[in-house]
Image (cartoon, coloured by chain):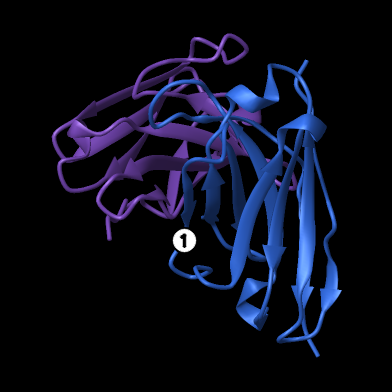
Chain colours: A purple, B blue
């Protein structure tokens, strides 16, 4: 079955840019969605179809997808961005949704 | 404003059964795919099952296939998950999520989850 690989953790200072990778075999040919989950809260959608952004998500959040890596980029990181982030794709071969293992973003 | 609310969680013994429910408001329920996602304590998100708006397409994770059954009642704007032969590893917070429109849709609204604990 298809596997999405994320680093367990990423750390960044406030005001800097955080980049969270999501690796998968030819993931660039698939549509990737990203979710943010703050401690004790339900996940929320932050990026859909690689680079789409819901209207209530700040412009600081952006996404890209090419080759074997999709990337969630958070510009001008704030303390409130500290959360777990998950990537997701649909695997048509197995007819299953796949989540990455999640990345904990720490704001230093 | 979309609202998604799960219910039905609880403590159940291994081998037992439980039925989760999810009520969703907002955009026409019957147009939306619906999904169950779970999260074991301290772990990441794990997709469980999905159902299309008209119940034509139904999918399950390998870990629950043959034990769990997803269904929906569009007249009641409700989604269900019948869980049989429960195991300790099914212990998790179960989220209901609404699918956006389109192919391979994102899950655009999530409930707060209902906790299932499988223990003797």
Q: Residues within 10 Å of mark 1 (few under 14, many from 20)?
A: some
Q: Position of residue A56 (x, y in %)?
A: 62, 12
The answer, for residue B95, to whether it is visible in the render is yes
The answer to which image quadrant residue B88 occupies is bottom right
* Location of residue A70 by image quarter: top left
* Left or right of B96 on screen, residue A22: left
Which residue, as the protein is rendered here, is positioned at the far bottom?
B120
What residue would you read off at disc 1?
B61
SS under mark 1: loop
In the depicted structure, whether residue B118 falls above or below residue A1:
below
- Picture residue at 54% right of the left edge, 14% below the top: A54
The residue nearer to you, when weighing A63 against B6, is B6
On-image quarter of the C terminus of chain B: bottom right
- Residue at the image position 39 percent from the left and 32 percent from the top: B104
**Residue drawn at point x = 25 percent, y = 28 percent:** A65
**Percent of width and height locating residue B80:** 72, 50
Viewer-closest of A96 and B38:
A96
In the image, is A20 to the left or to the right of A78?
A: left
Question: In x, y percent, where is residue B75?
Answer: 78, 31
Count how many numbered circles sit on residues in the image: 1
Badge 1: chain ID: B
Q: Which quadrant, please, contains the N terminus of chain B? A: top right
- The answer to whether one can see residue A38 in this image is no
Residue A81 percent across, percent down from the top left? 59, 30
Residue B110 position by quadrant = top right
Which residue corresponds to the image point at 68% horizontal and 78% vertical from the top-left?
B86
Horizontal arrangement in the rendering, residue B54 relative to residue A22 (left or right): right
């Amino acid at each position: 079955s298809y596997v999405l690989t994320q680093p367990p953790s990423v750390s960044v200072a406030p005001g800097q840019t955080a980049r969270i990778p999501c690796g998968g075999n030819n993931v660039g040919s698939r549509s990737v969605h990203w979710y943010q989950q703050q401690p004790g809260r339900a996940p929320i959608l932050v990026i859909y179809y690689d680079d789409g952004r819901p209207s209530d998500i700040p412009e600081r959040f952006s996404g890209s997808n090419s080759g074997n890596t999709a990337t969630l980029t958070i510009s001008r990181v704030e303390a409130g961005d500290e959360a777990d982030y998950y990537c997701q794709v649909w695997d048509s071969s197995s007819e299953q949704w796949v989540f990455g293992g999640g990345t904990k973003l720490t704001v230093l | 404003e979309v609202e998604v609310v799960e219910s039905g969680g609880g403590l159940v013994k291994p081998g037992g059964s439980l039925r989760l429910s999810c009520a969703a408001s907002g955009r026409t329920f019957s147009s939306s795919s619906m999904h169950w996602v779970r999260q074991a304590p301290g772990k990441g998100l794990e997709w469980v099952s999905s159902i299309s708006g008209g119940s034509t397409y139904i999918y399950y994770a390998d870990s629950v296939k043959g034990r769990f059954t997803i269904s929906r009642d569009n007249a009641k704007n409700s989604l269900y998950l019948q869980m049989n032969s429960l195991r300790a590893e099914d212990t998790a917070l179960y989220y209901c999520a609404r699918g956006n429109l389109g192919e391979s849709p994102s899950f655009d609204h999530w409930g707060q989850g209902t906790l299932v604990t499988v223990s003797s």
